[in-house]
Amino acid sequence: MKNKTLYQITHIITFLTIVHGLIYYIIKGYFQIETDFGIRPHPYQSVAQSIHILLSPLWIFIFGLLFKDHILDKLKNSSLKRITGINTILFSVLMISSGYLVQVIYEPSSKDVILYTHLFASLFFCIAYLTHIINSKF
Protein backbone atom coordinates (compact mmCIF):
# COMPACT_ATOMS: atom_id res chain seq x y z
CA MET A 1 0.00 0.00 0.00
CA LYS A 2 1.33 3.43 -0.88
CA ASN A 3 2.31 5.51 2.13
CA LYS A 4 0.09 8.47 1.20
CA THR A 5 -2.98 6.22 0.92
CA LEU A 6 -2.07 4.46 4.17
CA TYR A 7 -1.72 7.79 5.95
CA GLN A 8 -5.08 8.99 4.64
CA ILE A 9 -6.83 5.79 5.72
CA THR A 10 -5.08 5.98 9.10
CA HIS A 11 -6.25 9.55 9.65
CA ILE A 12 -9.84 8.72 8.67
CA ILE A 13 -10.10 5.59 10.84
CA THR A 14 -8.35 7.32 13.75
CA PHE A 15 -10.67 10.32 13.50
CA LEU A 16 -13.77 8.09 13.38
CA THR A 17 -12.58 6.05 16.35
CA ILE A 18 -11.75 9.16 18.40
CA VAL A 19 -15.06 10.86 17.61
CA HIS A 20 -17.04 7.73 18.30
CA GLY A 21 -15.16 7.06 21.53
CA LEU A 22 -16.06 10.59 22.65
CA ILE A 23 -19.71 10.04 21.70
CA TYR A 24 -19.75 6.74 23.59
CA TYR A 25 -18.18 8.40 26.65
CA ILE A 26 -20.81 11.16 26.62
CA ILE A 27 -23.73 8.74 26.17
CA LYS A 28 -22.45 6.44 28.91
CA GLY A 29 -21.59 9.16 31.39
CA TYR A 30 -24.22 11.81 30.87
CA PHE A 31 -27.29 10.28 29.20
CA GLN A 32 -28.80 8.04 31.82
CA ILE A 33 -32.52 7.52 32.32
CA GLU A 34 -34.27 7.54 35.65
CA THR A 35 -36.97 4.89 35.90
CA ASP A 36 -39.16 3.52 38.68
CA PHE A 37 -36.42 0.97 39.31
CA GLY A 38 -33.54 3.43 39.48
CA ILE A 39 -31.06 4.93 37.04
CA ARG A 40 -30.66 2.94 33.84
CA PRO A 41 -28.28 3.31 30.88
CA HIS A 42 -29.52 5.17 27.85
CA PRO A 43 -31.06 2.81 25.26
CA TYR A 44 -28.43 3.83 22.69
CA GLN A 45 -25.53 3.07 25.03
CA SER A 46 -25.36 -0.58 23.95
CA VAL A 47 -25.47 0.47 20.28
CA ALA A 48 -22.69 3.01 20.84
CA GLN A 49 -20.62 0.42 22.72
CA SER A 50 -21.09 -2.13 19.93
CA ILE A 51 -20.01 0.36 17.28
CA HIS A 52 -16.95 1.32 19.35
CA ILE A 53 -16.05 -2.35 19.79
CA LEU A 54 -16.34 -2.87 16.01
CA LEU A 55 -14.43 0.30 15.04
CA SER A 56 -11.54 -0.22 17.45
CA PRO A 57 -10.21 -3.46 15.89
CA LEU A 58 -10.27 -1.72 12.51
CA TRP A 59 -8.10 1.02 14.01
CA ILE A 60 -5.79 -1.61 15.56
CA PHE A 61 -5.44 -3.26 12.13
CA ILE A 62 -4.56 0.07 10.51
CA PHE A 63 -2.11 0.74 13.37
CA GLY A 64 -0.49 -2.62 12.58
CA LEU A 65 -0.10 -1.68 8.90
CA LEU A 66 1.30 1.68 9.90
CA PHE A 67 3.66 -0.03 12.34
CA LYS A 68 5.11 -2.14 9.56
CA ASP A 69 5.31 0.57 6.89
CA HIS A 70 6.00 3.72 8.90
CA ILE A 71 6.91 3.27 12.54
CA LEU A 72 9.62 0.61 12.21
CA ASP A 73 11.09 2.40 9.21
CA LYS A 74 11.29 5.72 11.08
CA LEU A 75 12.71 4.12 14.22
CA LYS A 76 15.44 2.33 12.23
CA ASN A 77 16.35 4.87 9.57
CA SER A 78 15.47 8.32 10.80
CA SER A 79 18.14 10.38 12.49
CA LEU A 80 15.41 12.38 14.20
CA LYS A 81 13.05 10.26 16.27
CA ARG A 82 10.21 12.56 17.08
CA ILE A 83 8.96 12.39 20.64
CA THR A 84 5.37 12.91 19.43
CA GLY A 85 5.54 9.70 17.40
CA ILE A 86 7.06 7.75 20.27
CA ASN A 87 4.39 9.08 22.65
CA THR A 88 1.70 8.13 20.13
CA ILE A 89 3.06 4.56 20.05
CA LEU A 90 3.24 4.30 23.85
CA PHE A 91 -0.27 5.66 24.42
CA SER A 92 -1.60 3.45 21.61
CA VAL A 93 -0.27 0.33 23.30
CA LEU A 94 -1.67 1.43 26.66
CA MET A 95 -5.02 2.35 25.09
CA ILE A 96 -5.29 -0.97 23.22
CA SER A 97 -4.31 -3.02 26.28
CA SER A 98 -6.67 -1.23 28.64
CA GLY A 99 -9.47 -1.34 26.04
CA TYR A 100 -9.13 -5.10 25.88
CA LEU A 101 -8.94 -5.48 29.66
CA VAL A 102 -11.99 -3.30 30.27
CA GLN A 103 -14.01 -5.86 28.31
CA VAL A 104 -12.77 -8.97 30.11
CA ILE A 105 -12.31 -7.93 33.76
CA TYR A 106 -15.43 -7.81 35.89
CA GLU A 107 -14.11 -7.15 39.41
CA PRO A 108 -15.46 -3.62 40.15
CA SER A 109 -12.40 -1.92 41.65
CA SER A 110 -10.03 -3.36 39.03
CA LYS A 111 -12.45 -2.45 36.26
CA ASP A 112 -12.58 1.17 37.49
CA VAL A 113 -8.78 1.44 37.46
CA ILE A 114 -8.62 -0.04 33.96
CA LEU A 115 -11.46 2.18 32.74
CA TYR A 116 -9.71 5.34 33.96
CA THR A 117 -6.45 4.09 32.50
CA HIS A 118 -8.22 3.66 29.15
CA LEU A 119 -9.78 7.12 29.34
CA PHE A 120 -6.52 8.87 30.21
CA ALA A 121 -4.51 6.84 27.68
CA SER A 122 -7.08 7.76 25.03
CA LEU A 123 -6.93 11.44 25.95
CA PHE A 124 -3.13 11.51 25.86
CA PHE A 125 -3.15 9.48 22.63
CA CYS A 126 -5.37 12.12 21.02
CA ILE A 127 -3.04 14.90 22.14
CA ALA A 128 0.10 13.04 21.00
CA TYR A 129 -1.46 11.99 17.68
CA LEU A 130 -2.71 15.48 16.82
CA THR A 131 0.64 17.00 17.82
CA HIS A 132 2.44 14.43 15.68
CA ILE A 133 0.25 15.22 12.67
CA ILE A 134 0.57 18.99 13.10
CA ASN A 135 4.37 18.73 13.50
CA SER A 136 4.66 16.56 10.39
CA LYS A 137 3.19 19.37 8.28
CA PHE A 138 6.01 21.75 9.24
Image (spheres, rainbow, N blue to C red):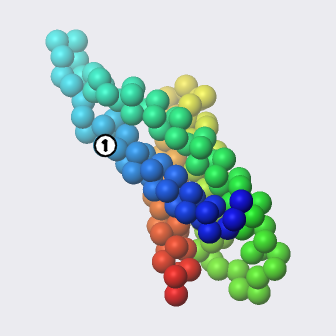
Position of the N terminus, as image quadrant, is bottom right
User: Which of 22 and 3 lies nearest the eye of the viewer?
Assistant: 3
| Residue 120 shows in the view | no
Q: Where is residue 109 in the image (x, y as percent from the top left)?
A: 50, 33
With 57 as the anchor, is 69 left or right in this view? right
Q: Where is residue 135 in the image (x, y as percent from the top left)?
A: 52, 81
Q: Position of residue 98 (x, y in %)?
A: 59, 44
Question: Looking at the image, which residue is at 76% across and 82% down?
Answer: 78
Residue 46, compared with residue 12, is above or below; it is above
| Residue 86 shows in the view | yes
Q: Which residue lies furthest to the top in this view?
A: 37
- Dot 1 lies on which element? helix
Question: Looking at the image, which residue is at 69% across and 65% down?
Answer: 2
Q: How many marks?
A: 1
Q: Where is residue 126 in the image (x, y as percent from the top left)?
A: 47, 62
Return the residue at label 1: 26
Residue 72 placement: quadrant: bottom right
**Given the image, on which type of amino acid does mark 1 rest?**
Ile
Residue 41 placement: quadrant: top left
